Amino acid sequence: MLRKLPSLGRAVGLSLATIGFSSALMAKTELTMYYPVAVGGPITKVVDNMIVGFEKKNPDIDVTAIYAGNYNDARIKALAALSSGKPAQLSVMFSIDVHELMDQDAIIPFDELVKTPEDKQWLNSFYPTLMQNGKAQGKTWGIPFQRSTIVMYYNKDAFRAAGLDPENPPKNWDELVTAGKKLTVRNSSGKVQQWGAMIPSTGYPYWMFSALTKQNGAVLMNQDGTETYFNKPAVVEALSFWKDLGSKHRIMPDGTIEWGTLRQNFLEQKTAIMWHSTGNLTTVKKKAKFDFGVAMLPAQKEFGSPTGGGNFYIFKKSSAEEKAASFKLVQYMTAPKQAAAWSEATGYMGVSEQAYQTKALSRYVDNFPPAAVAKDQLKYATAELSTHQAGRVRKLLDDAIQSVLTGEQGAEQALSSAQKQSDRILRRYR
Amino acid sequence: MMTGAFSQVKGIGYISLPERLAAWLLGFLWILPLLFAFWAAFHPSEYTTHFDLFAPLTLEHFVSAWDQAPFARYMLNTIVITTLILVCQLVLCTLAGFALARMSFKGKGLVMALVMMQLMVMPEVLIVENYKTLANLELIDSWLGVGLPYMASAFGIFLLRQTFATVPQALDDAARIEGCSLLQVLWKVYVPQARSVYLAYALVSISYHWNNFLWPLVVTNTEASRPLTVGMAIFGAPESGVDWPIICAGTLIAVSPLLAAFLIFQKQFVQSFMKAGIK
Amino acid sequence: MNRTRQLHAWLLLLPALAMLAAFTHIPVISTLFNSFYESPIAGKPGQFIGADNFRFVLDDDIFWKVLWNNFWYALITVPASIALSLIMAIWVNSRLSGRAIIRLAYFTPTVLPMIAVANIWLFFYTPEIGLINNLLEALGFEGQNWLGDPDLALPSLMVMTIWKEAGFFMIFYLAALQSMDTSLYEAAAIENAGRWQTFKRITWPLLMPTTLFILINALINAFKLVDHLFILTKGGPNNASNLLLYYIYENAFSFFDTAYAATLTSILLFILALLAWFQFGFLDKKVHYR
């Protein structure tokens, strides 16, 4: 009986060793990433499929992709996870969160991970405008993934009915107003049946506003996110124009316009023109029961739209292997082939020139030219409002915009008070 | 429920015709959101905002809702969280309510005041601090994390204290003479007497936690613990462009168990409230 | 013997008290404590800054707006939902045909999660394609931008809140009405008292404890129920419909300014303390209970 024990022990030891050995062989790097969705469609499924593709190619890496709601939710959840037992190693978050994430010391620059010439080539492959929001202090902190610009969706049938050329949508503000007046249809008692245009002013009013300001030749902040220019005359002028579309030209409803229901308004032909994220393109294409077109936003002094959407970030609080694996994943997800598939499925932009050169996407764009508008507009695009304490600063501007659109304050008054408060917040970062 | 003689009394049983109509109208208004949910969920999207009696029926929205969000998992989370909270509440509140009803000890007044404080300061108010506490306990994104702040309920303690205080002392004494221990007395004498209070409390607690949103939103991160409400919120967030038919289908999936339970138990529900003296 | 009895009492209370302490009492104290510190940045704890946070609060226009909104929100929704729930209970308690269906209808909002039905309410309120405006326009009235007009956004939220609350409170009134002593009503009938007289002299006084219970619940809810804001308005336009707890959430979880959130929470706690004082020190003496 006793003599048996050592052999038993040995057997146990041996099997333990086997287990240890095999688990070492099998040791997978486990990654968790959070991502947001701010546009329509079953995007979670698309992401899941891309992840499956990655795991097949990299059997030693296990990825859990977690859908966390809107951009704000995703940032909260990802940062919250860092201090919990189950941290994320990388995440897709708002491109404009970069300064705040740096202030929290939460992320690392991609420059630390870029080593080989191929890596460098990859890093330089993205559209430069899309890189703007990811850069700070001379380093790259965010890699473009689900990126968009604002485009103008318009109802060609309505254009025809109003005697406008459906292939020649408004190219500047004046044309927008003239066309809008023709497109606004009232019934016999003067009630509006179809509005000329709608620009959403809930959810992300500051984003829509950056388009108007860029068109008027102004930007809202500096690259380091320490200064805002809310009270510059061109900015005030842009906000007055937005307000005038409703109160003076009467081609847009008064008050704020809900971001979430706008697409439905457009689909039900309650507005002939809407400004919205390119991310809605696929859904609009699927659901529109009329002939629609997509065009660049009209210009005043120049064309313009902010870029928008989410970038990949890699968190500091992760091991070297995890960082390397995360880097691999980011490279995979943003490679031309994936970027092309992603763009086709969602309407988001292909993030690099090569993505549009892939067979799949170039064929898609040929068959469906609206898909190229966002890309063509990129050369006029500017970075999205991004500062330190981004949430607070954004809210200041959002509130100012809404107070003007609802007629509570004049543009000048609202914007200079927003600027004063933003100065107070940003002073300590200068 | 009502005696014949009683309902003939003009003061309380009587209802005039205009009032009847008003009652029906109000009922219609109150159920309208639910009716709309049924309408939108079972008809093709083009009919969502256009009412047509002969619109074709479809189940496609249920399919796509089910496809787009892991409802089964959310449902499981909600059931586990709700049950976990309820069981702990019943145990904790019974013990505390009994002590406060039938035992004398120093500092009882103070304890009572400390308990009642939670009636006013519900855990919702303290999300920021409670979040920190749970982060320290590494319980973020877990069932237990969602449940913990609610497990001691001042409302439950107070309710059971009131009920236990009305149990005749003679029953208590008799059980003791038979040699029952303190906990046996509680279990054999007091708990059975409070059956309808337990039922009423359970229904309130279940409908509260089934529908609770703010705290679960803060404390859950992933599908592992995310309940239906939070799942619904991120699934139907206006940011992604409101798609009413799918949201309505999702809503119906989410509320069906609770709605069915209420349909089945609605009579007992009111009666248990009545007997429980929650009034 | 007395000693063991005391010990037993404390043992019975211990689990509940421990949980209450961990998730109510200690957090209350640390909230007050944190409102005198800066927010931690990148894991480094903030400095003690005295009453600076409170000074910022007093200087914060949004705070005043939010407080004012919350005041109105409570002032309108609490009496309205109580009155409506009482009327509902009286109706459902009468000889009304289809009583069970109507009771169910009144009660449905309680079973529906606020966050999910908010999307349905969004459909009611949305201009152009929404239900309310289509109805109004069919009847020849002007539609409104319910959630996009600062004068209408908060009232629109109030309507939804009343809808949500009234049905739940009805159950309490209904239970009270059904367990009432019928002899008083028989006496009133003999005296030939009118319905209003009977209500005023018998029903209302007898329902007083219920009303008090509901009142306190409704008041607390007025400061606690913000779920629909997440979907309907996010507090906008320009904070026209923002409420205190939602503003706390924004500060803590969107701006990561936990110290400021703690300061705002302290103020909310102060308001709740006032309500408690109002209940225990004032109302309880007026209404005799039990």
Image: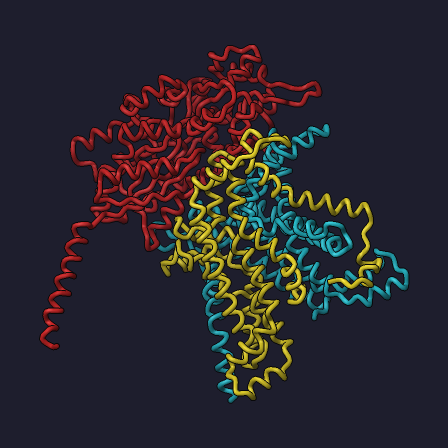
Chain colours: A red, B yellow, C cyan
In the image, A348 versus B173, the foreground residue is B173
- Residue B114's spot in the image, x, y percent? 54, 69
* Relative to A268, residue C220 above or below: below
* Relative to C254, residue A378 above or below: above
Q: Is residue B124 left or right of residue B196?
A: left
Residue B234 visible, this orientation: yes
- Residue A313's spot in the image, x, y percent? 31, 40
Q: Is residue A89 left or right of residue B218?
A: left
The residue sitting at 59% across, 26% down in the picture is A253
Residue C36 visible, this orientation: no
Residue B11: quadrant of the picture? bottom right
Q: In this view, does A15 lie to the left or right of B141?
A: left
In the image, B254 versus B166, the foreground residue is B254
* Relative to C134, residue C189 above or below: below
- Residue A171's spot in the image, x, y percent? 46, 15
Q: In this view, does A47 lie to the left or right of B13?
A: left
In the image, A419 versus C270, the foreground residue is C270
The residue sitting at 62% across, 76% down in the picture is B165
